Amino acid sequence: MAEYTDVLTRPILHPHAMRAREVLNLLTRLAVRVSPAKSLALCSDPDDDCFLECAEAAKADYLVTGNLRHFPKDYTRVVIL
């Protein structure tokens, strides 16, 4: 949630602040919280490792991102889209 909050409250999104707050509120209410069992260091952007860790902990089949280039191409447990 910290990463989503950081991204959605950036100054560039200020014109959409109200919508960003709505999205954060929805995520807070509807998200399934998981606690990663292990730390990973596989992404080119270390801030994105937490998403892979959470996908692992949730036994997710997919991880959807707008930054494919930050994630490992040969990761086999979770399909990264």
Image (cartoon, rainbow, N blue to C red):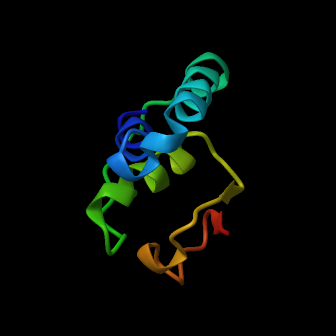
Pinpoint residue 15: horizontal percent, then vertical percent.
49, 42
Question: In the figure, 77 relative to 35: above or below?
Answer: below
Question: In the figure, 12 relative to 28: above or below?
Answer: below
* Residue 32 appears in view: no
Residue nearest the observer in this picture, 75 or 63: 63
* Residue 64 appears in view: yes
Residue nearest the observer in this picture, 28 or 12: 12
Residue lying at the far right of the rendered structure = 61
31 to the left or right of 9: right
Write the residue at 55% across / 28% down: 18
* Quadrant of image for the C terminus: bottom right
Question: In the figure, 68 relative to 29: above or below?
Answer: below
Pinpoint residue 43: horizontal percent, then vertical percent.
36, 70
Residue nearest the observer in this picture, 14 or 26: 14
Total number of numbered discs in the rendering: 0
* Quadrant of image for the N terminus: top left
Pinpoint residue 41: horizontal percent, then vertical percent.
29, 64
Residue nearest the observer in this picture, 14 or 44: 14
Write the residue at 53% across / 83% down: 73
Pinpoint residue 33: horizontal percent, then vertical percent.
54, 26
Write the residue at 37% across / 57% down: 49
